[in-house]
């Protein structure tokens, strides 16, 4: 039959020879009877390909290997790899054409780690990109299955008050405190915070920059350093030759999720995300009356649409327009005349 086990794998593997061509593939199952059925179907597929020139049936694992090899330049390559690893057990061995929207939705909505539409949509977007490439570039599919995204409720992001921020810093471990302070001072994203290097900072001119490779939008970002940011940087000088933020003398490159959750709970802001520090920075600037165009440039956003989520926090620029309503209801004599007219004491 050609079934065998490989070291380190609990799945059955198949060795199939058709017209002198031998292929070795995982059956994707540890059940021997199911593996025998799989190998019979696969042998028939290979025979039709040889005899009638049918297009090979490419499976999910074929697409994963090719995608990860070609997408190494992507900024979110590691994220893609994590998402594909999570879905691999559910999709292993499946032909690409069988990965439909309904089938993928059942897998995603039943997964305990994917509780929100936004989280599930990140997986859908990755799967959709792979299927489209399989159709348009690799020519593995005549037509890629349609994968639709879920509707995501709009969210302006959560922000905290200055009092809450003070408590958050106070209960945080010493190595995390400067990171929180700098995030609130600059609004940098987490990856840019933890990857901040001294050679991207000009202390004399009080500015830093994020390179296009590190920026989410692919464009360089320049940011002036305010007093709070300079205080943090001066306190971090000399700890490491390359990286700004450190823990026990080593670069502080990632924040333990459990530690962060505990700190937030102790500060009275449970559920706060690290990215919410960026929302807090933007919200504080909006409340201080910073022009939306300036806020857009400081935050490195490509359009004003991302800034508009904070516009409701400052309406001072609308006061002049609001004051144009005629002030007719404040005249007590007019109100008194109307009351008298209504009671029949004044006739027209």
Image: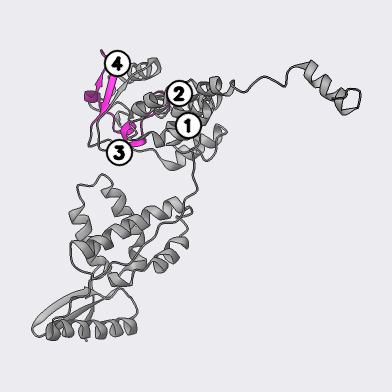
Few, some or many C-alpha atoms within 10 Å of disc 1 (few <14, some 14-19, many ≥20)? many
> Residue at the location (28% across, 72% down)?
95
> Of the residues under marks 1 and 4, which one precedes in the sequence?
4
Report the front residue among 107 and 348. Answer: 348
SS state under label 4: loop
Look at the numbered discs 1 and 4 and tell me whether their residues touch, using CB distance below 8 Å: no
Q: Secondary structure at mark 3?
A: loop
Callout 2: few (<14), some (14-19), or many (20+) C-alpha neighbours within 10 Å? some
Q: Which mark is residue 340?
A: none
At a point 22% along the width and 64% down the height, the residue shown is: 134
Viewer-side residue, 135 vs 171:
135
Q: Quadrant of residue 336?
A: top right
Q: Earlier in the sequence, mark 2 or mark 4?
A: 4
Residue 204, magenta (yes or no): yes
Distance from Cα at disc 1 to Cα at disc 4: 26 Å
- CB within 8 Å, label 4 to label 3: no
Mark 1 residue element: helix
Q: Which residues are magenta?
A: 184-211
Residue 30 location, quadrant:
bottom left
Where 86 sits versus 298, above or below?
Answer: below
The image's mark for residue 285 is 2
| Mark 2 element type | helix
First along the sequence among labels 1 and 3: 3
* Residue at image mark 1: 310
Disc 2 and disc 1 in contact, CB within 8 angstroms: yes
CA distance separating discs 2 and 1: 9 Å
Image disc number at residue 206: 4
Of the 4 image quadrants, the one containing the C terminus is top right
Mark 2 / mark 1, whichever is N-terminal:
2
């Amino acid at each position: 039959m050609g079934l065998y086990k490989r070291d380190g794998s609990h799945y059955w593997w198949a060795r199939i020879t058709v017209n002198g061509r031998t292929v070795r593939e995982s059956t994707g199952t540890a059940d021997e009877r199911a593996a025998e059925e799989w190998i019979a179907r696969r042998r028939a597929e290979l025979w039709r390909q040889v005899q009638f020139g049918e297009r090979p049936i490419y499976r999910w694992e074929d697409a994963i290997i090719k995608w990860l090899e070609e997408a190494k330049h992507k900024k979110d390559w590691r994220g893609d790899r994590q998402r594909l690893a999570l879905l691999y057990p559910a999709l292993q061995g499946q032909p690409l054409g069988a990965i439909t929207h309904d089938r993928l939705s059942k897998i995603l909505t039943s997964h305990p780690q994917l509780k929100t539409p936004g989280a599930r949509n990140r997986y859908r977007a990755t799967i959709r990109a792979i299927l489209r490439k399989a159709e348009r570039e690799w020519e593995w599919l005549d037509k890629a299955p349609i994968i639709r995204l879920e509707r995501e409720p709009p969210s302006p992001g959560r922000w905290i008050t200055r009092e809450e921020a003070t408590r958050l810093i106070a209960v945080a471990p010493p190595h995390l405190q400067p990171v929180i302070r700098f995030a609130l001072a600059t609004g940098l994203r987490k990856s840019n915070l933890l990857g901040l290097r001294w050679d991207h900072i000009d202390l004399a001119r009080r500015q830093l920059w994020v390179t296009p490779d590190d920026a989410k939008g692919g464009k360089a970002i320049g940011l002036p350093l305010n007093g709070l940011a300079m205080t943090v940087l001066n306190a971090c000088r000399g700890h490491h030759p390359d990286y700004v933020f450190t823990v026990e003398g080593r670069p502080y490159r990632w924040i333990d999720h459990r530690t962060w959750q505990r700190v937030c709970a102790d500060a009275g802001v449970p559920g706060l995300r690290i990215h919410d520090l960026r929302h807090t920075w933007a919200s504080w600037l909006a409340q201080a009356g910073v022009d939306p165009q300036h806020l857009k440039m400081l935050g490195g956003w490509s359009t004003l649409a991302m800034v508009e989520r904070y516009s409701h926090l400052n309406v001072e620029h609308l006061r002049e327009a609001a004051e144009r309503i005629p002030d007719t209801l404040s005249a007590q004599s007019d109100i008194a005349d109307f009351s008298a007219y209504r009671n029949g004491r004044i006739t027209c």
